[in-house]
């Protein structure tokens, strides 16, 4: 494959075998890859907007996988497949399913028992999901879309603005986002909650 991606802070490098899963062989630059991924993601957003989701629809391993396929299935052969290698972030590859199911059950409990406000439930879910890092790539965008689905479809509130910027490119907004994620890693969700609504 001719693609030699350049990674910015917070992005997870792909292994050679993962890069071989690129379905569009004419892609040679990171810009082209971002463009094709964005087109696929927009299709996934339209798909999600046209559906109504119940609690029991969203908080399943099947939904997590399906959404990743909807977002990346036209670009990556491995879309929707849990990663088979360990990365610079995330749980051990053998613990993905276990940790994901813990998160799904925890979140249902938070909602049913009103443990946190709606924004915080969606943001805590997003943060833990990206920390598990289920897939070889696209985990940040995937977790943000799920947070939007949770806040809009489950809680009937406005979707998050995520700094009103494209977070896949190096920018001030991305720096703030990464800083907020690192604070959340330490248990402080305030910055991530603020960023999500900025």
Image (tube, rainbow, N blue to C red):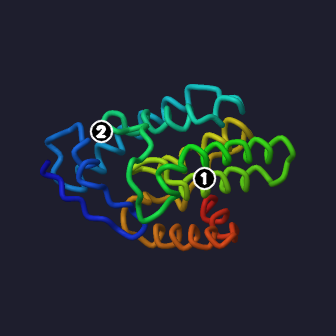
Question: At 49% from the left edge and 56% from the top edge, which residue is drawn?
Answer: 92
Q: Is residue 61 left or right of residue 19?
A: right
Instruction: State the image coordinates of residue 141 (x, y, percent, origin top left).
Output: 47, 50
* SS label for mark 1: helix
Looking at the rendered structure, which numbered label has been put on residue 42?
none
Residue 28 in the image, given as x and y percentages of width and height: 15, 51
User: Which callout, 2 or 1, points at the residue further toward the start of the chain?
Assistant: 2
Whole-angstrom CA distance, mark 2 to mark 1, is 23 Å
- Disc 1: which residue: 126
Disc 1 packing (10 Å; few <14; some 14–19; many ≥20):
many
- Location of the C terminus by quadrant is bottom right
Nearest the viewer among 178 and 13 is: 13
- 105 or 34, which is in the foreground? 105
Quadrant of res 127: bottom right
Tag count in the figure? 2
Q: Secondary structure at mark 2?
A: loop
Rendered location of residue 55, percent (x, y): 72, 33
Q: Which mark is residue 75?
A: 2
Q: Residue at x 30, y 39 (%)?
A: 75
Q: Viewed as shown, does residue 3 lie left or right of 70?
A: left
Residue at 60% across, 45% down? 98
Q: Nearer the viewer, residue 37 or 89?
A: 89
């Amino acid at each position: 494959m001719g693609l030699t991606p350049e990674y910015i802070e917070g992005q997870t490098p792909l292994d050679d075998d993962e890069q071989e899963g690129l379905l569009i062989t004419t892609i040679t630059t990171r810009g082209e890859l971002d463009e094709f991924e964005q087109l696929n993601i927009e299709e996934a957003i339209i798909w999600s907007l046209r559906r109504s989701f119940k609690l029991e629809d969203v908080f399943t391993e099947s939904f997590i996988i399906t959404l990743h396929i909807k977002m990346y299935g036209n670009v990556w052969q491995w879309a929707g497949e849990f990663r088979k290698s360990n990365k610079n972030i995330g749980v051990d590859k053998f613990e993905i399913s276990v940790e994901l199911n813990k998160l799904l059950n925890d979140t249902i409990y938070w909602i049913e028992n009103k443990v946190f406000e709606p924004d915080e439930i969606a943001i805590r879910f997003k943060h833990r999901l990206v920390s598990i890092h289920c897939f070889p790539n696209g985990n940040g965008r995937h977790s943000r879309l799920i947070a939007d689905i949770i806040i809009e479809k489950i809680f009937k509130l406005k979707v998050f603005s995520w700094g009103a910027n494209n977070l896949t490119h190096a920018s001030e907004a991305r720096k703030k986002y990464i800083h907020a994620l690192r604070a959340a890693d330490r248990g402080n969700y305030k910055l991530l909650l603020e960023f999500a609504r900025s």
